[in-house]
Image (cartoon, helix red, strand yellow):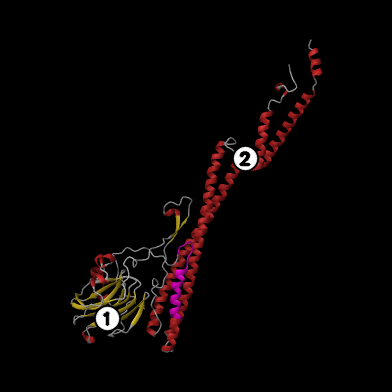
Amino acid sequence: MLTINSPRLRTPNLLQNAQSITSTYEKLASGKRINSAKDDAAGLQISHRLTTQIAVKQQTLRNLQDGISYGQVADAGLSELTDSLQRMRTLALQAANGSNTDIDREALNEEFSQLRDHINSVVANTEIFGKKPLMSKPEQETNLDNVPVLNEVFSNNVQQGMRSGDVSLGLIPAGSTNVRIQINDNGANDDLNLFTQTGEHLVGQDLSSVQSRIEANLFTPANGYQGTETYSNGNLFTGGGFNFPAVNSQTINGMNFTYSGNGNPSSGSSNEELFIDNVTEPLLLTVIGSGMFRITASWDSLGSLNSSSAESSDGPMMVTSTDQAIGEDGYIIFDDIDASAGSLTIDGITISSEDLAQNAIARIDTALSRIGGFRAEIGAKMNAIESTMRNQSNQSSMLSSANQRIEDTDFAKVMAEKVSLDIVQQASVSVAMQARDITKNGILSLLGQLE
């Protein structure tokens, strides 16, 4: 017997129609064509891959923007150094003029010295992302361990005899204070000399005439050097003429040296002495000659060899240039820069005399040239980053468009489907309601007509 609610009277596709309506509403509500794997399994996989690529491109863009910020901070610091150096050059040129008195030059030198100190202050305080763009130094290999520290060779303030030659007698570590070296060469013309571990001749007599011998015999690993150094006397302090006891001074690389100059038979003295108030970098002591001499070394304190090693670099600034970031090709690299007064070879220069002012002008010109090179390099890196940003931004935009075509709802199409499904659903409901209105008598009447 048929009933009003018989399944045979129901719309056959009613369940399927309801599911289609639910899916349509989900697409309209979320704005997504693919809301689950059953909507489009292959499309979902492609969309996930594109979404990952888009997220990576966006992070690469943020990394590149950080690189721009790093370059801008470094360039701003270098701009300040340029201004200071230009003012220093103006002062040096003024001091080189013969119309100035010693008192005038002292006044000029006061501002000059303040500007020189300001350069180191700017370098030390220019910082971004925990890095200091203007004071990074590449870590240096060192053979200083091959040379005994001063207190391993000498007893403090006790005279002893030694033989001169092309050899490092002792190491004066950074951090040492009030170091005094005095020698008597017994008329053999042995000379005190101080070198840095890079082969820079700081104190003594000019050895450029025997440069090849110094580079071959003294600049060896056994004497604390790498063996590849070139003799340099650009900062050499010769003592300003013989003056024993030593009274003439000069500041080099932040260290004040008081040196007697060359004691020899023609000067009437076999003595030489040297004072260093505060040692800022490792120094290698050598007595050049071919005789026996007596030497007395004294100090208030000696620094540590470990603490005196070259300052470790915080590393170059490596900015990701691709979403792979593998190997050097994956980065735009801001190389280490050392813009300190010492590195620019202007530490210790003064303009207290015409000759010193002229020397300062030459040093400052060299420093300005180096700063210009640094700024050109940074500018080139920033341009490369901006070009990379445009490329990455274009790729991100194209990937987003591709992903939208796969993932996003086509509202016009889905709305048309919704209207069609609504009509079918309403028709189904209407048919069902009409079926419910058929009475039992009406059905029996129909059955009677069949007899």
> Percent position (x, y) of residue 49?
52, 43
> Percent position (x, y) of residue 360?
40, 79
Count of numbered marks: 2
Residue nearer the viewer, 303 or 355: 303
Up the image or down, 300 lies above or below 42; here it is below
Numbered mark located on residue 273 in the image: 1
Q: Secondary structure at mark 2?
A: loop
Position of 331 compared to 406: left or right? left
Q: Residues within 10 Å of mark 2 (few under 14, many from 20)?
A: many
Q: Is 127 colored magenta in this rendering?
A: yes
Q: At 66% across and 30% down in the image, what residue appears?
A: 16
> Percent position (x, y) of residue 418?
70, 36
Q: At 60% across and 43% down in the image, what residue appears?
A: 405
Q: Is 30 colored magenta in this rendering?
A: no
Residue 412 in view, yes or no: yes
Position of 9 compared to 253: left or right? right
Marks 2, 1: nearer the viewer? 1
Q: Secondary structure at mark 1?
A: strand
C-alpha separation, residue under disc 2 versus residue under disc 1:
88 Å
Position of 199 compared to 425: left or right? left
Residue that sits furthest to the top in the current view: 451
> Percent position (x, y) of residue 45?
54, 39
What span is in magenta?
111-131
- Residue type at tag 1: Glu
Name the quarter where the C terminus is drawn.
Answer: top right
Residue nearer the viewer, 9 or 418: 9
Q: Earlier in the sequence, mark 2 or mark 1?
A: 2
Up the image or down, 179 lies above or below 8; here it is below
Name the quarter where the N terminus is drawn.
Answer: top right
Q: Name the dominant secondary structure of the magenta segment.
A: helix
Up the image or down, 256 lies above or below 65; here it is below
